[in-house]
Image (spheres, helix red, strand yellow):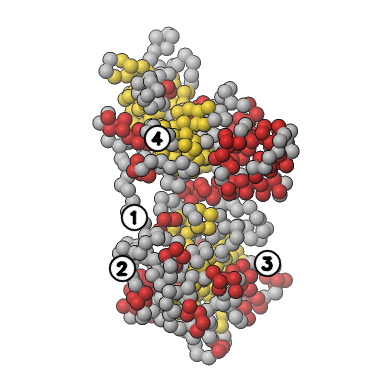
Amino acid sequence: MEKKQIESILDDRLLVQELSGRLDAGKGTYKANQWSVPAGAVRRALLGAEDGGAGAASLTEAIIVEFGRPSLLVQHDTFTLPESDVWKQRLYPAKSRIEAGIRGVGRLELLDHDTYPWVGTAWMITEDIAVTNRHVALVFAQKAGKGFAFIHNSAGKLVRAQVDFKEEYREPLSLERAVKSVVFIEELNDKYPDLAFIRLDKSVGLPSPINLSTAALSSALDPDRYVGVIGYPARDSRNDATAMLNVFGDIYDVKRLAPGKVTSVPDGSFLFTHDCSTLGGNSGSVVIDVDTGEALGLHFGGQPRVANYAVSASAILQALRGLKIQVPVPEMPAPSRAGIAATAKALKPADYANRRGYLADFLGTGKQHEVPLPVLTDEQSAEVARLKEAGPGHGHTQEYVLNYTHFSLAVSAQRRLPFYTASNIDGARLRRMPRDADRWYLDPRIDAEAQAGGAIYTGNDLDKGHMVRRLDPVWGTQAEALLGDEDTFHYTNACPQHKDLNRKTWSDLEDYVLGGAGAHRLRVSVFTGPILGSTDPPYRGIKIPQEFWKLVVMVRTSDMKLSATAYLLTQKDMISDLREFVFGQFRTYQIAVQDVENRTGLSFGNLHDYDPMTRRSLAATGTTARLVEGPGDILL
């Protein structure tokens, strides 16, 4: 295969890096061995080096099929995770939206047809209408007067059709809905898009329709957009048998998600091309935007080793409107505040003049109770976002510390996320306030380019994860509490977190800290932040942290000495030190303060002297980390 035929893979820098790294680590080369091609030829093909031999040329096809464009099985309305870490990182932020699309796609099955038990894929586009291909519909229906009718088989019996929205791998259940009528089949001419509409029986309930992409409808579809095809690939003799085995594992006729990207968008055309892995049964599949789960188009065919073709969302919408069929088109989202000043109110640096920020002597006077801000490394100091005008307080750190009401923080301009946040909580003066509609702000005291604005959080499962919890600085006078609440809604205080992150133990830990402070009327100082790792997965120009830490400092009433406990929230199995990034259950651990320093580079002075995890020997505790599943697991 010529190099130009795999440009979509070779241009994918992250994917090429991953494949090359897998080869360097001795992973994944068994596929090359099946083709009798040395691993060196694989590497040269990936890196674009001239090989001169037949090995690299014959393998480039296998790279596309076997690694670059997987086909993922669907089970229980969700997709199995790909082997590729790059694709994990691209698919997971919008997992729930992709799952919504999965539920709306079904296999088009035929009853009493002479030849086919099923014929392709269809997906919901209104509350009771599904869209599929013209060439699929013509297998069981035909033009009849001004409308369309089902055909008869060779015995004169009427052929019927139904859509099964299950037919998943090893899924015994079905979700079959009868096709009541054929609404429309486009004229059989290459000048018209390959599409048809069928009406389903909604009396017993149907999956929700898949929204057409607002981006595709409002502007020209851009090449290189990451997409996924959801449908039912069948064994297809037009494709190479070995390649099919490597991609599909000899499992056919069940629902799959195949990620890839748009490869071309011809001017003035109703179609676009993509490079997702598809087979014959994929006719009628939906092509979704993997960032939003919205439908970009309708897959209708392809040429092996060349391109796959799809009808654009705009052409589908035009056909529906021509039939006077109302289709829900979501409104365009309001402009995000990424890269622009907040529109809720025009903020200026002078507006923050009354913010005192974090107080080092909050827990008591005297050196024994003073808890200063953490110290950055030289490297961190070189990349910290600096204030346009030096602020008051905190000595030499006034050049970069952002003071808010009862908390302060420092931002990495390179990562556009906080190095740390530091807050004071007065348990005797806490106020409970309901959460109003969120309004997030860029901080005008540092460059907007140093802040991760709203764009990264749009149309996916990522939450704006508060580092300083919203309720922590809500204490003092009514005016102070209101301002403390509002100050937490700055992008400088947020990190992208998957929506499932705070559902259990991390939230419980925060409730325990704040609840304990309130119940015992304690003063507490809390430091929180992300671990900004070099291997964090990139997404929309931001590397998403995989781990978060929290350090809680208070004065013990028993001896009036400091107590410092540290916690880590991670998706990784830190005990067995698994290196592969696996999306799974989030876990919270109590760790040593020294471990936080080692992982973040920050220095917390002598706080490790007041850490029970440091005082307890390894032999006594049996581990360097304690899994926290509830308050009773915390060592104080």
Q: Residues within 10 Å of mark 4 (few under 14, many from 20)?
A: few
Front-lying residue, 439 or 425: 439
Sequence-wise, the earlier of marks 1 and 4 is 4
Please state which amino acid type lies under the numbered disc 4.
Asp
Front-lying residue, 493 or 158: 493
Q: Secondary structure at mark 4?
A: loop
Front-lying residue, 158 or 491: 491
Nearer the camera: disc 1 or disc 3:
1
Q: Position of residue 301 (x, y in %)?
A: 48, 27
Please state which amino acid type lies under the numbered disc 3.
Thr
CA gap between label 3 and label 2 equals 51 Å
Residue 3: give its label. none
Q: With respect to residue 173, does 226 lie above or below? A: below
**Residue identifier under label 1:** 335
Nearer the camera: disc 1 or disc 4:
4
**Looking at the image, which residue is at 49% across and 43% down?**
224
Quarter placement of the N terminus: top right
Q: Position of residue 222 (x, y in %)?
A: 43, 42
**Residue identifier under label 3:** 623
CA gap between label 1 and label 4 equals 27 Å
Sequence-wise, the earlier of marks 2 and 1 is 1
Q: Secondary structure at mark 3?
A: loop
CA gap between label 1 and label 3 equals 49 Å
**Residue identifier under label 4:** 267
Sequence-wise, the earlier of marks 3 and 4 is 4
Tags 1 and 3 touching, CB below 8 Å: no
**Residue identifier under label 2:** 346
Please state which amino acid type lies under the numbered disc 1.
Pro
Please state which amino acid type lies under the numbered disc 2.
Ala
Q: Residues within 10 Å of mark 3 (few under 14, many from 20)?
A: few
